[in-house]
Amino acid sequence: MSTTSTPDATAHPEDGAFDTHLVQAKWQRLWAEADPFRAGDEGDTRPRKYVLAMFPYPSGDLHMGHAENYLYSDIVARFWRHRGYNVLNPIGWDSFGLPAENAAIKRGADPRAWTYENIAQQKASLQQYGVSFDWSRVLHTSDPDYYRWNQWLFQQLYERGLAYRKESPVNWCPNDQTVLANEQVVDGRCERCGAEVVKKKLTQWYFRITEYADRLLDDLNQLEGFWPHKVLQMQRNWIGRSIGADIDFEIEGRSEKVTVFSTRPDTLHGATFFVVAPDSDLAAELASGASAEVRMRFQDYLERVQKETEIERQTADRPKTGVFLERYAVNPVNGERLPVWAADYVLADYGHGAVMAVPAHDQRDLDFARAFDLPVRVVVDTTAPVTGAIAVIELDEQGVPIDPGSAEPGLAELDPARTGVALTGEGRLVNSGALDGLSKRHAIARVIEQLEAAGTGRAAKTYRLRDWLISRQRFWGTPIPMVHTADGRIVPVPADQLPVELPAAAGLDLTPKGTSPLGGASEWVATVDPETGEPALRDPDTMDTFVDSSWYFLRFLSPGDPNTAFSTAEADKWGPVDFYIGGVEHAILHLLYARFITKALYDIGLVEFTEPFASLINQGMVILDGAKMSKSKGNLVLFQEELELHGADALRVGLAFAGPVEDDKDWADVSTTGAAKFLARALRVARDVASPTDVVWKDGDGGLRRVTHRLWADVPALVEQTKFNVVVARLMELVNATRKVIDSGAGASDPAVREAAEAIAMVLDLFAPHTGEEMWEILGYEPFVGLVPWRQADPTLLVEESVTAVVQVDGKVRGTLTVPARVSADQLEALARADEKVVRALAGRTITRAVVRAPKVVSFTTA
Ligand code: ANZ
């Protein structure tokens, strides 16, 4: 394709300044016409790379965090294209959700119209930014042809028992008037609006992510080295596997036993009381059998507890509170009667919502026992040595070992009832019948054997991870594709009736009121029982938008396909995503959900991989004057404004140069002016090139060629290590070196100048693609530089430069050496001493003095 007819947008040859907006518009038009960044199809035999940036939420203008995100993914995508790969780099919009809906309510607009207007605006910005997306694959999760596959996914999970309804205490945001997943509660507050989250008992839809807890945890190991370690650790903590035992306790006067989870079953003989979560069904049941006074006290206490956040309840150093329920549990190993208390430090939805309390060895239990004067019994002697434990021998001032007998306190002195400090360390069992003398580890194994034999307990694991609550009482989301029949059954909407489309928002009251606005769409809600044809009601709730984003990377592989969610064949070809790029704020929620859904799809037989994102790149935040940008603070730097001000390339280079990918970048330190100057210098180099396109190399290894070839050699590893700022620095170095040669004697006709200019254009394409294309054209080539294969560095030019060193013996030159220019003094002296001529000149005399000035001179004086 020829571009000769396009106007010259760069007509300021004197100073290199050029109209970036004109250049930008010209190349964007040519890209739009030729579509060079569309992923190759069937016939494309190149190896593949799937590069994906987390897709944006269309809740307003894009900001500088987006600019950073889509810059990094574009650098990676452009790089792999140069390396000869068929690159898929798609974009779409995560366009359902609360912010759009709330904004729509505030402005009285239709959430649908509002959302798609924002999408159009964001799309225009991204196009102006010059990102090499495959624009043929755009998807919006709020399109019926997308969300019908959310409904399909829901039903797939439902069929396998992985989607289910249950009544339980849920996180409720009183401001947004909707339930929240555990992942959306941060420090006891709503992740979105900051309101304090309370517990409310509701019947909701869940995805059974806990069934995948072990795999979600264990498979993190295979991502080590490919995902940031910090993210892996956050996921591990979130899943929070605890290993121990489930132990069944009889409660006097109750036919069914109550199970507790304990990580320390070895301390079973030390249990002195029993605690249930006040907000559990069990507590209510036990309290109902108590005296009138206790019933009242319990009711008061429960009301207090319900106002507390989970964080408060788990805080270690707050005064312990509770109510004795006048009931007793029976210790299965020794028949002891343990008073049953309700106390807020036990959580209803962890383990089984009840604990055996062992105050001697658990700090929370000890604090409680001391507050309510309950017995404390030590069952692990933490002063007794355990084989394998490292003995630390302390020395006194004279270096004499201190007798441990006299330094270490005895067990009596450590009595937790008196000291208030629970004994949590290693030790040997005491006061525990047949377990006495065993180490903690052996005792745990033995107790579990005993419990299993007696049928009163078993080895067990518990996770911090809860099932994923996915129903929301809001309008702007995927309708849950289920029908509630008149006789109380809940059945899936038949597949051929999907999608269940959202009704028009007009006429519906969208303001949050605790029940889904869809329930008020009477025509929409009324349906028929698919089995009997009798009148029935649609489920009025919508899905958490994290469902939408849990599999979107698969939809990009066959977008718009009306017959399937995604093509399994395409998933085999492209999946998993090779590079996933986005903010660390998604370290838990989105990534965990996408991992879970991928594993579920693997089990269903629809994908062949078990992890969705082979490697993850997290970018730092763009901040302003040290502070996080936010709408409410009014310190948002808007993407569109900056684009108009500086043009895409200066913005991109400024950001890329601002620091390491993972670091936060202060916008105040980002120099778009510096970037613009650098780009003008680069472009001027291309204009100054005076040699023809076919370079013929004569002998010689001019310094400039070395700088160019070192760039070719080093950039691949630097890009793969995401050291983008270093690559920009290296480009600046090459531009300066080229300028020097142009301005020197050899001048612009030196073929090395052309070679350097071509390298600059190609590597610059990763960061400033419009300038890169423009340079490439000025250098006499057809577009697009973005598709030009990477050049191989000439290995002979990577060898270090060498110099000649002179060796003197007693003031006379006795030898010359060819040595690397960066030789060290020691190396040079050793080479001189070993040189044959020098050895001959020395004739066995002893060297008394050596003066070395690397890399040029070595001077020996002999005796
Ligand atoms: C007896 C015991 C003795 C315990 C001991 C610990 C130390 P992690 O590690 O966090 O999983 N627990 C169980 N269910 C609970 C609930 N619903 N709310 C509050 N605490 C609960 O902690 C597991 C331990 O936390 C369990 O082991 C139980 O106390 C307590 F020396 O049982 B342990």
Image: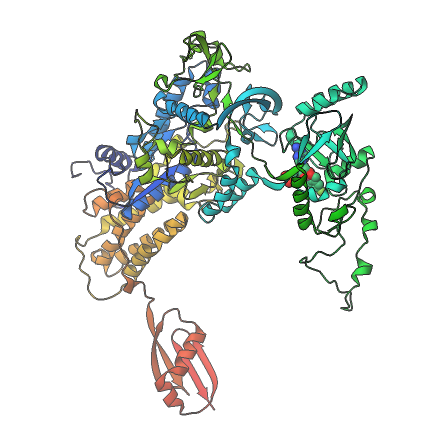
Going 65% across and 44% down the picture, which residue do you hit?
Answer: 449
Quarter holding residue 644: top left
Describe the colour scheme in one phrase: rainbow
Nearer-the-camera pick, 436 or 320:
436
Can residue 651 be seen by looking at this rendering?
no
Nearer-the-camera pick, 87 or 710:
87
**In screen coordinates, is 162 left or right of 802?**
right
Where is residue 114 shown, x and y percent of the image? 40, 19
Image quadrant of ligand 1 equals top right
Q: Is residue 660 above or below residue 809?
A: above
Q: Is residue 85 above or below residue 489?
A: below
Where is residue 578 shown, x and y percent of the image? 37, 43
Q: Is residue 323 above or below residue 691?
A: above
Where is residue 161 shown, x and y percent of the image? 48, 27
Quarter holding residue 345: top right
Where is residue 858 shown, x and y percent of the image? 41, 80
**In screen coordinates, is 446 left or right of 184?**
right
**On the rendered image, what quadrant is the N terminus found in?**
top left
